[in-house]
Image (cartoon, rainbow, N blue to C red):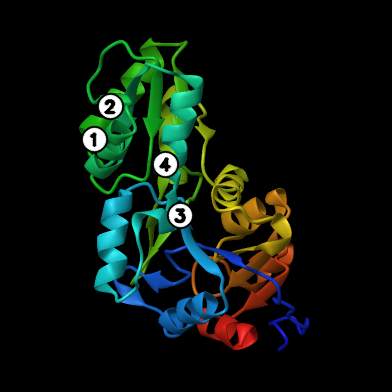
Amino acid sequence: MKDYFGREADLSGKKLWLLDMDGTIYMEDRLFDGTLEFLSQIRARGGRCVFITNNSSKSVRDYLTKVQKMGIPAGEEDFFTSAQAAVLLLQSRFPGARVYCQGTESLAEELRRGGIDVRLDVEPVDVVLTGFDLELTSEKLRRTCQILTEQKDVAYYATNPDLVCPVSFGYVPDCGSMSIMIRNATGREPIFIGKPEPTMIQIVMKRFGFSPEQTVVVGDRVYTDIAAGVRAGVTTVGVLSGEANVEDFKAGPCPTYLFDNIKELLRAVE
């Protein structure tokens, strides 16, 4: 089967499918047509699907509950989020550090589960971590800006650079846009942890024992999903069901293949 650009899609031999979530397999609480069939087809062929997302507003347990309600069979091992990537980074680079977290309670709890010393108020800390915060308040922003302004040597990280998150009526500001607000107020730029960095992809490949040649990344964003896959040296598949349009994908980095949605990708796999 040919993709959107008329390229013959050869997806034979692909065993590890790393799927973005928002805008790729569902939109908020609406599962896209073909998602369940696609997941079943990959598993029937002896492959593995892992959901990788930059959205740090939910913990793995939250995501597990969400997809199970949609009818997707999954376990905690089937997810890897930017929050989990943040835990690994903090454990390796800042062991025992005091971490101020601007994010949802789910993000804070994910950090605590990883043994991170989470602080939520203005006090001396070693690291500031911001995430996509659906519980954001002006008081939270004030605390973040105060710490970054008064504590010049504090390390500053953000879970992901996504500018918007797709929702049923369009988009809402994501962590990247929130970081721009903070930069405008403090002059501080965060180091981003999630996609487009290839780290999440590399960790999952290593965890399950698959090579780059066996791996595919599927997503709706050029500057995160596709860019991360390109940097990791794996096959990339773009879908037009989320943020990016055709012109975005043409501008690049261009995915290996482009399809309208997950249902069309299912047809290519079949």
Discs 4, 2 touching: Cβ within 8 Å: no
- Report, in whole angstroms, how far the alpha carbon at label 4 lies from the one at label 1: 26 Å
Rounded to the nearest angstrom, the CA distance separating label 1 from label 2 is 6 Å
Quarter of the image with the N terminus in it: bottom right
Identify the residue under disc 2: 142
What residue type is disc 2 on?
Arg
**Label 4 CA crowd tier, 10 Å (few <14, some 14–19, many 20+):** many
**Quarter of image, res 6:** bottom right
Q: Position of residue 88 (x, y in %)?
A: 46, 33
Q: Residue at x 69, y 55 (%)?
A: 211
Residue 191, above or below 117: below
Q: Are marks 1 and 2 in contact (CB under 8 Å)?
A: yes
Q: Secondary structure at mark 4?
A: helix
**Apparent side of residue 203 relative to residue 63 in the rendered image (left or right):** right
Q: Which mark is residue 53?
A: 3
Q: Is residue 3 above or below residue 245?
A: below
- Tell me the element at label 2: helix
Circle number at residue 84: 4
* Residue pointed to by mark 1: 138
Kind of residue indicated by mark 4: Gln
Mark 4 or 1 closer to N-term?
4
- Report the Cα–Cα distance between label 4 and label 2: 26 Å
Residue 63 versus residue 87 in the image, above or below: below
Q: CA distance from mark 1 to mark 3?
A: 26 Å
- The answer to whether any part of residue 64 appears in the image is yes
